[in-house]
Image (tube, rainbow, N blue to C red):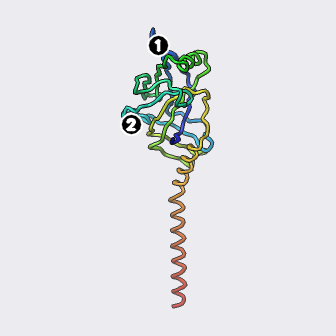
Amino acid sequence: MLKHETRNVAQKIEIREDGQAPRLVGYAAVFNSKSVDLGAFVEIIRPGAFKRALAGNPDVKALLNHNEDRMLGRTKASTLALAEDDHGLRIEITPPDTQDGRDVVTNVRLGNYDAMSFAFEAKRQTWDMDAKPPLRELFDIDLFDVAVVTYPAYPETEVDLRSFEAARAAAKGPVEEARRRGLEILELELGLRRVGRRA
């Protein structure tokens, strides 16, 4: 299975009941807020990052700790609702009446679960390699799943580092190409001078 990047946000998850089945409400992502240091860079998600993806009515799953065997909701089943607002990616999950569903509601109520996460692939991004640490800004994201997670950290992953290395290589590319061409021109000029001297 293709590995996606994941990001967590430590924001309170609320339980809404209103005489209905309990629902989990919170944010899986927030805008305009720098992430913690991801090991090689920091990141900001910009408003509108989810707009295109959500407009396509994707079949997004709500999972426990990104485990596909522990389903809590799904947009296709109308047990997961997603919306982008001024704050970020708002989620509302109606957990099933299963052991996992009941356990999640109980653990959120007790405060044992207090973080959300989302799995994504960046479609439009910019990198500022001059920033310390380098800064990545996300403007357009494909969304795969959201999750209630145990740890509200931003763990460094191999996929994250591959994204950073690709951006760093792309940033160096034009400079290295210009340097290479400059050396070729210099070598050509020196060669012409040597030829000129012989004449």
**Horizontal and vertical percent for residue 138?**
48, 40
Q: Is 96 situated above or below 188?
A: above
| Residue furthest bottom in the image | 199
User: Relative to residue 145, is residue 113 depicted above or below?
Assistant: above
Q: Residue at x 52, y 69 (%)?
A: 182
Q: Nearer the viewer, residue 2 or 27?
A: 2
- The crowding category of the residue bearing disc 1, from other C-alpha atoms within 10 Å (few below 14, some 14 to 19, many at least 20), is few
Is the residue 109 above or below the residue 135 in the image? above
Give the image location of residue 103, x and y in percent: 57, 18
Picture layout, residue 156 above or below residue 172? above
Circle number at residue 21: 1
Badge 2 element = helix
Return the mark for residue 52: 2
Q: Secondary structure at mark 1?
A: loop
Q: Between residues 60 and 176, which one lies in front from this camera angle?
A: 60
**How many numbered discs?**
2
As shown in the figure, which amino acid type bears the numbered disc 2?
Answer: Arg
Circle on res. 160: none
| Residues at marks 2 and 1, CA–CA distance in whole angstroms | 30 Å
Residue type at the position of mark 1: Ala
- Circle 2 packing at 10 Å, graded few (<14), some (14-19), many (20+), is few
**What's the residue at 41%, 24% (across, down)?**
77
